[in-house]
Amino acid sequence: CFEVESVSRHKNQLIFKFRGVDTISRAEALERAEVRIPLEERLRPDEGEYFQSDLIGCEVREKASGERLGLVMGWQETGGPGVLKVERDGNGGELLIPFARAICVDIDIDGRRILVDLPEGLKDLNRP
């Protein structure tokens, strides 16, 4: 366990300087290491931005009908916007919803709710 001394950004990546890691060889041994930050110590995201971990467990409802679609159970990285992996209620399988402002129109982290405005046909994809 290392204490973070400083953080900088280089070419869209974060570079961590850990206390006591003062040589290139010691730093290289930690390359691509997982960094964990206690929830109470992490920075708050900017307005309109969210931690993936905060989205997990949110209820997803369709804005137009109010129909509950399921719960966010995961996140999938793509080449563009990320995708919410929603476990449908009942035995409805998985629904993949692009995490885009035009689709995820209201996100209430405190209320654990996401309202979506789905493009026609998206809800019918991946049905078992």
Image (cartoon, rainbow, N blue to C red):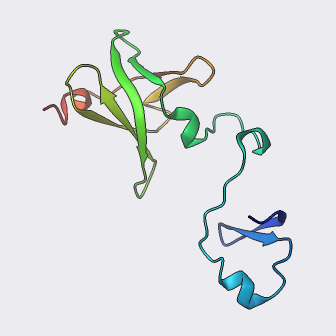
Along the viewing direction, whichever of 110 and 124 lies nearer the viewer: 110
Question: Residue 125, relative to residue 26: is it above or below?
Answer: above
Please state the horizontal and vertical placement of residue 67, each as a whole percent of the image: 33, 11
Where is 118 relative to 6, above or below? Answer: above
Taking the spot 72% from the left edge, 90% from the top edge, the residue there is: 25
The image shows residue 16, relative to residue 49, as above or below, that is below
Residue 94 rendering spot, x and y as whole percentages:
26, 34
The quadrant of the rendering that contains the N terminus is bottom right
Q: Is residue 3 visible?
A: yes
Find residue 24 and report its horizontal and vertical position in percent: 75, 89
Camera-nearest residue between 121 and 55: 55
Q: Name the quadrant containing residue 11.
A: bottom right
* Furthest residue toward left: 128
**48, 31: nearer the viewer:** 31
Quadrant location, the C terminus:
top left
For residue 54, side relative to residue 21 (left or right)? left
Task: Name, please, the residue furthest toward the front.
Answer: 1
Tell me which corner region of the image, top left, top right, bottom left or bottom right, holds residue 51. top right
The image quarter containing residue 6 is bottom right
